[in-house]
Image (cartoon, rainbow, N blue to C red):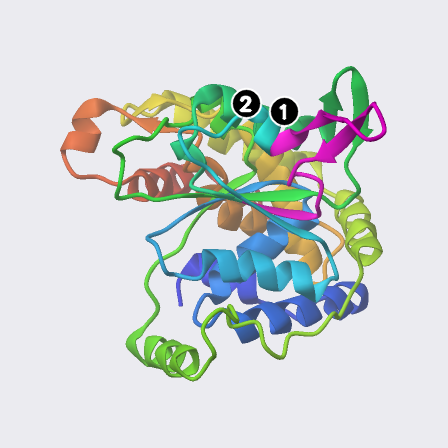
Amino acid sequence: MTEEEAIFDQGPPSPDASALVARLRAQVEHAVLGQREVVSQVLAGLLAGGHVLLEGKPGLGKTMLVLALARAFGGEFGRIQFTPDLMPSDVTGFRLFDMKSQTFQLRRGPVFCNLLLADEINRAPAKTQAALLEVMQERQVTIDGETLKLAPPFMTLATQNPVEHEGTYPLPEAQLDRFVMKILIDYPEQETESDIVSRAAAEVPGEMGGGGLEVVASPEDVVRAQAATAAVQVVREVVDYAVAIVQATRENKAVWLGAGTRGAISLVRIGKAIALMHGRQFVIPDDIKAASLPVLRHRVQLAPEVAMGGQTMDEVLKTIVESVPAPRQ
């Protein structure tokens, strides 16, 4: 188990967090095998009220993860398959003139849900990407001058394929910054993969592997948990530690573009979520350290010579985080 996994999986949680996180985790892990760290990070993103960028090769359970989480708390699930011809109105909705009533009728887009899967977001042009990212930021949609609020909680989990780049429109840095975390999904271990194959082969095609999932919470429970997460205490020394890590990304010679202030804010927000999941009402430096990779890996760009030399983003970030002294607990 990696140090990051150990921090995310330590326990026990507080009574309130245990009642929510443990139930949600059990349901999601029933549907998505072998991705415990990914599930933990997605739950942290949900508690922090943020949006998550998922990156992994096709067929690793990204859709099933989002669907299982939505079912677990009784939330409405929405999905958009991003394509080059997708229009902003296909995301947000539009008004259509009804000949029978002689009035314009509102057709709500798929963003009107609790958990939205934005599949292969980088396959749509910038204008369509911007329409979704505005919804993510404002939690509202404006159609023909009418502003429509989205029902809380609202969370977008967008996916990117790290292999295929032909016909894609990469997200600009300013738009990537709207995601609180970038989570990497890797192949499961051999034994787990055999379990997945055996289970999938026994299912009727089209069932999505969601059999046996139960509703164990409500959207209102999630909103209350998000409020409790925001109320978690963080002392100035820990805030300074998060800011110091972000500033170190700007000063390191291996980095061409460092993280901005929103990166430090996201570090603290995810640190609060991790603390709540672990049963604490205060953030410790290890919470910030555990959040650093998923929070910063999409906000930083490596220097060209470093990238050409074969160093990965996570390797550079680990070196940067280790170089920043943590405050004494």
Give, as a single range, the part of the protein colored magenta: 91-117
Q: Mark 1: few, some, or many residues within 10 Å (few <14, many ≥20)?
A: some
Q: In this view of the protein, which residue sits in the foreground, 237 or 249?
A: 249
Q: In this view of the protein, which residue sits in the foreground, 40 or 139?
A: 139
Q: Would you name the residue on which mark 1 appears?
A: 134
Q: In this view of the protein, which residue sits in the foreground, 243 or 176?
A: 176
Please indicate whether residue 27 sits to the left or right of residue 171 in the image. Answer: right
- State yes or no: residue 135 in magenta: no
Residue 192, disc: none
Q: Position of residue 123 (x, y in %)?
A: 39, 33
Query: What residue is at 62 percent from the left and 79 percent from the top?
Result: 212
Task: Please determine whether, in this image, residue 59 is positioned above or below residue 111.
Answer: below
Task: Kindly give the residue lying farthest to the left in the view shown.
Answer: 309
Q: Amino acid at mark 2?
A: Ala
> Is residue 283 visible in this depiction of the protein?
no
Task: Please determine whether, in this image, residue 33 is positioned above or below residue 160.
Answer: below
Task: Kindly give the residue lying farthest to the front in the view shown.
Answer: 100
Q: Mark 2: few, some, or many residues within 10 Å (few <14, many ≥20)?
A: some
Query: What residue is at 49 percent from the left and 69 percent from the top?
Result: 206
Report how many numbered discs are placed on residues in the image: 2
Q: Would you name the residue on which mark 2 appears?
A: 130
Q: Which SS class for mark 2?
A: helix
Q: Amino acid at mark 1?
A: Glu
Q: Position of residue 120 (x, y in %)?
A: 42, 41
